[in-house]
Image (cartoon, rainbow, N blue to C red):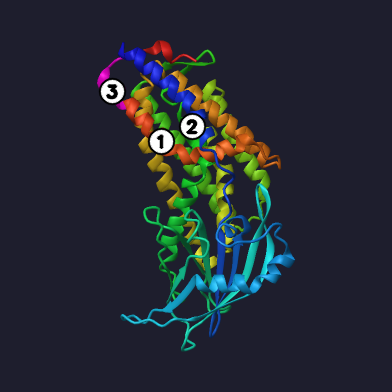
Amino acid sequence: MITGILVRVLQVLGIALACLVCVTAQAHPIPESTLALRVEKDRVEANLTIPLSEFRLAFDLADPVTEAGIDARSGQIANYLVRHIVVTSLDGTDGDASWAVEAQNIRLDRGETAEGAYAEIAARLAFRSPDGEIGPFRLSYDAVLHKVVTHRILVSLTQEEGDGLGRQIGIISAAPKDGSVAPLIVTPETSANNFTSMLRLGMSHIAEGTDHLLFLLVLLLPAPLIAVAGRWRDQAPGRCALWTIAKVVTAFTIGHSLSLAVAVLLHLDIPQAPIEVLIALTVLMGSLHAIRPLFPGKEAWVAGLFGVVHGLAFSFTLARLDLSSLQLALSLLGFNLGVEIVQLAIVVATMPFLLVLARVPGYRALRLGGATVTGLAAIGWTAARMGQNNPLAEIGDGIGAVGVYIWVALVMVALFSLFAGPGRKARSGIAG
């Protein structure tokens, strides 16, 4: 009776993966704003870019948006930006002084992603301290963020040319709990905050990288099983399953860490679009393998090889920040460690429950459902990254929005199976 209930629940859960994603599907992720600061002798200059689609949610613009229209309202846009930027000095005590903020050269520009070009608002900013001295300062910025709490701003800092210092990176974003935006402390003299900032950037990048995480998880779906005659049939012994999981995760980590390091340290000029297409194809291959064993026993080698491709994709984020050589090693270490922390946390939080569910007949439905949804998303991503927008790509992008709910459902079903029927093995439903 209990086994029958579990089979039904897992079947429904496998089907629900597709339905839930479809209901909450969202568009392709929008590029972040960028704020590139440059320290001069008596001021800090900045180049600001904001994706137009995000900017319009906070600032009313009439259709169609044209260069002439932006020029006509450049003064209003400049005033809007100045109202949402506050810079204050830090003097080491409890006092601070506000800086003068200017915004000019407002224009309509174009940005590029793997999915193609997009429109953006660009501006040149200048921050001037009251005493003409450039020391540590507090940057409070909430343009767009005060309306769009999911928006992010990547901030880079360059010292005046010739002073021997490199770039720092920070991320300005709204707190998920209450939408508050913490100021960014910028310290031109040192790079102490760079590692922490890059650690956060790496964690954020992988947490939002649905394709990277799905590739890893879809390779782990059949890890508790044994391939027999071209099909996933029997449950693998506990130690064997854990060893397979460890090898896959380690190989993927080594693969993407090596290619990330090589691409960034050697400043390789790699075209982004073909790499993003390859990423989607690796997800598709992993999905097919979860349905029918394509490379049984060689999952670690495949994970390592495909990890190299994923590492090249990671490198695009660091390349966009244009880091100098003095900051590069520390930034690379922090970014990669951030990626690993989130990746390992997701695996540790998910795999114990998959190992429990592998003992239940309905695991086949869960495996096939998850692999099918992931495979369809991969097909959609492949087409979108080749210039063909489609609903499947939007479904794939929506998976991240429902990931927590899927995980909670997995945990609840796994716990139910564990306590309702301990020690039971029902291999008849594992075959597939």
Label 3, on which residue?
Answer: 418
The type of residue carrying mark 1 is Tyr
- The correct choice, above or below, for 405 with respect to 154 in the image is above
Instruction: Answer whether labels 2 and 1 touch (C-beta < 8 Å).
Output: yes
Residue 405 badge: 1
Decide which of tag 3 and tag 1 comes sooner along the chain: 1
Residue 176 is situated, as x and y percent measured from the top left of the image, at 40, 53
Q: Which residues are magenta?
A: 415-424
Quick one: label 2 or label 1, which is nearer the N terminus?
2
Residue 391 lies, with reference to residue 181, above or below; the image says above
Q: Amino acid at mark 3?
A: Leu
303 vs 296: above or below: below
Residue 281 in which image quadrant: top right
Look at the image and say whether residue 149 sits in the magenta stretch: no
- Which kind of residue does numbered mark 2 sit on? Leu
C-alpha span from label 3 to label 1 = 20 Å
Relative horizontal placement of residue 108, taking residue 346 as reference (left or right): right
Judge left or right: residue 301 versus residue 345: right
